[in-house]
Image (cartoon, rainbow, N blue to C red):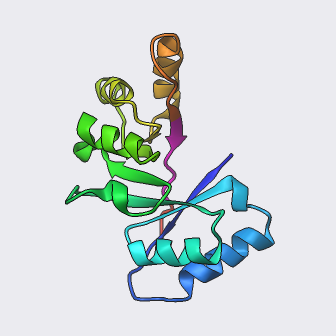
Amino acid sequence: MGLNIELKYNLPDPTLAPRVVELLKMTGMLDQCVVTSLNYEALRQAKEIEPRLVTGMIVTKVLGDPTRLGVDFLSVNVAEVNRRLIRRARQQALAVHVWTVNDAATFERMVDHGVTVVITDRPIELASLRRSRTSLSAPTLIALRLRRLLVH
């Protein structure tokens, strides 16, 4: 199973990205993980430390052209996905991961748009839809979104 590790910054921490990269290298997980963040500088720093690391910018709102950020993929809020964004991403050889897709109609629309990865809370339901569409369109990977509940 691959992991999508999100670098979250509630406070500035210039050591977070380097520590995550080092941990991935130490554990031999570099090729099994992607690192995402809302913080572009953190992704740039991680990529500079380890160029083989696959990085993705989390896009909650599309302003300008996020396909020119120098990351490997875009992780886009489902409300912001459209054919134009997908076309631009393909022109830059970027994958597009979309979150959070939990219903059949939205899943169908995202597959029709050509997204690469669909992130969902309902993988069993969407996997069934994916199997029924395999012969009709390019396969789309379905990723389960796991939420860690913090108890304070």
Give the magenta range: 142-147
Q: Residue at x 30, y 30 (%)?
A: 106
Residue 23 visible in image: yes
The residue lying furthest to the front in this view is 91
Residue 151 visible here:
no
In the image, residue 81 sits, relative to residue 126, either above or below, namely below
Q: Which residue is more in the foreground, 92 or 37?
A: 92
Quadrant (top left, top right, bottom left, bottom right) of the C terminus? bottom left
The image shows a total of numbered marks equal to 0
Q: Give 94 or 117, whichever is nearer the viewer.
A: 94
Relative vertical location of residue 104 with respect to residue 48 in this rendering, above or below: above
Task: Name the residue located 39 percent from the left edge and 87 percent from the top edge.
Answer: 11
Residue 99: percent from left, percent from top: 37, 46
Q: In the orientation shown, which residue stands out farthest toward the left? A: 63
Question: Residue at the location (49% across, 21% down)?
Answer: 130
**Coordinates of residue 64 in the picture (x, y in percent):** 21, 59
| Residue 59 located within the stretch drawn in magenta | no
* Residue 46 position by quadrant: bottom right
Quadrant in the picture for residue 96: top left
Residue at (24% x, 46% y) in the render: 80
> Where does residue 42 sit, x and y in percent of width and height?
47, 77
Q: Is residue 70 left or right of residue 23?
A: left
138, above or below 70, in the image: above
